Image (cartoon, rainbow, N blue to C red):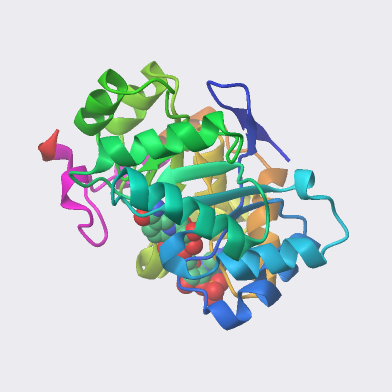
Amino acid sequence: MEHVTFNNGVQMPVLGYGTFQTPPAITAENVTKAIDLGYRSIDTAQVYGTEPGVGTAIANSDLARDQFFVTTKTQTDGYAATAQGLDDSLRRFGGDYFDLVLIHWPTTHSLETYRALEDAYQAGKVRAIGLSNFNPDQIDELLANSHVKPVIDQVETHLFWQQAKLHPYLATHDIVHESWAPLGETFGREMMALPEVTALAAKHGVTPAQVLLRWLTQQGIVTIPKSTNADHIASNLASLDFSLTPDEITSLRQFDRHHSIKDWPQSMREDRY
Ligand SMILES: NC(=O)c1ccc[n+]([C@@H]2O[C@H](COP(=O)([O-])OP(=O)(O)OC[C@H]3O[C@@H](n4cnc5c(N)ncnc54)[C@H](OP(=O)(O)O)[C@@H]3O)[C@@H](O)[C@H]2O)c1
């Protein structure tokens, strides 16, 4: 497994398993499948309803808790609700810490919400804190009004929206870029059918999905593809077993459409910052 190192020294696997839209009743079973196939990083969130299933799968595995990297995301409801919400998340998950907690999306309560994460970090309830769906202006405001630097920003990133504007900002600030929807959710089929992508897949003897994932991870972008299909879960992780050349990585830049597949949140639009 390859890792990125955060600005606080904590390391995170570059590829993990996402649980958005996984029915809570089958989350434990799916996450167990992913763990058995070699995944150690799992992405959950309060709104997904998958924290209990992730916790159950980890508790039922033969591995110690410290062999895993678990991310959850809080609602952005201000100090008291976030502090309480994080304790509730830990209870649902069944542990005494998370590896990473993100503010799921910005609201007018982002600063107080972040203060609750800072306090949870100081109290040892979380090893690193970060953001999701924050644009550079919102991060600038947060940096000017906080003490603990965020380690990561998890944002929609894939072939059709490469975040060419955001990525250099994050690199300059030593904040890791993490991709959600790395396979473009419902746009995945279109991406995977592009002749340029299928040609690279054939050349390297891999699948188009593996090309799309490796293209992200080789740029230092952490990612968390989601699948309920055992073959996909295994082959997504195996995308780390080959490398694209620098020219091949560059050749895929032509497919950037510079906008979201679902226009959410609108504050991330490239013309909004
Ligand atoms: N922070 C945020 O606001 C936010 C928003 C959205 C998502 N996320 C996180 O990011 C994770 C990933 O994003 P996502 O679930 O939205 O989208 P995604 O991973 O881009 O796409 C998931 C879709 O791709 C298919 N797929 C996966 N592997 C495949 C493969 N090897 N070949 C062909 N199809 C494949 C899956 O179908 P099969 O099940 O059939 O494989 C599923 O329909 C989420 O689970 C969640 O943890 C965060």
Q: Position of residue 247 (x, y in %)?
A: 48, 30
- The residue lying furthest to the bottom in this view is 25
Residue 9 visible in this rendered orientation of the protein: yes
The image quadrant of residue 85 is bottom left
Position of the C terminus, as image quadrant, is top left
Q: Tell me: residue 217, above or below residue 26.
A: above
Rendered view: 268 above or below 111: below
- Write the start and end of the magenta stretch as one range: 252-270
Looking at this view, is 260 or 256 the one in front? 260
The residue at 27%/60% (across/down) is 261
Q: Is residue 196 visible?
A: no
Q: Nearer the viewer, residue 84 or 151?
A: 84
In the rendered image, which quarter contains the N terminus? top right
Any magenta on residue 151? no
Q: Quadrant of residue 18?
A: bottom right
Q: Whole-percent x and y of residue 112?
A: 29, 38
Residue 214 percent across, percent down from the top left: 57, 44
**With 161 as the anchor, is 23 left or right in this view?**
right
Q: Residue at x 52, y 53 (%)?
A: 87
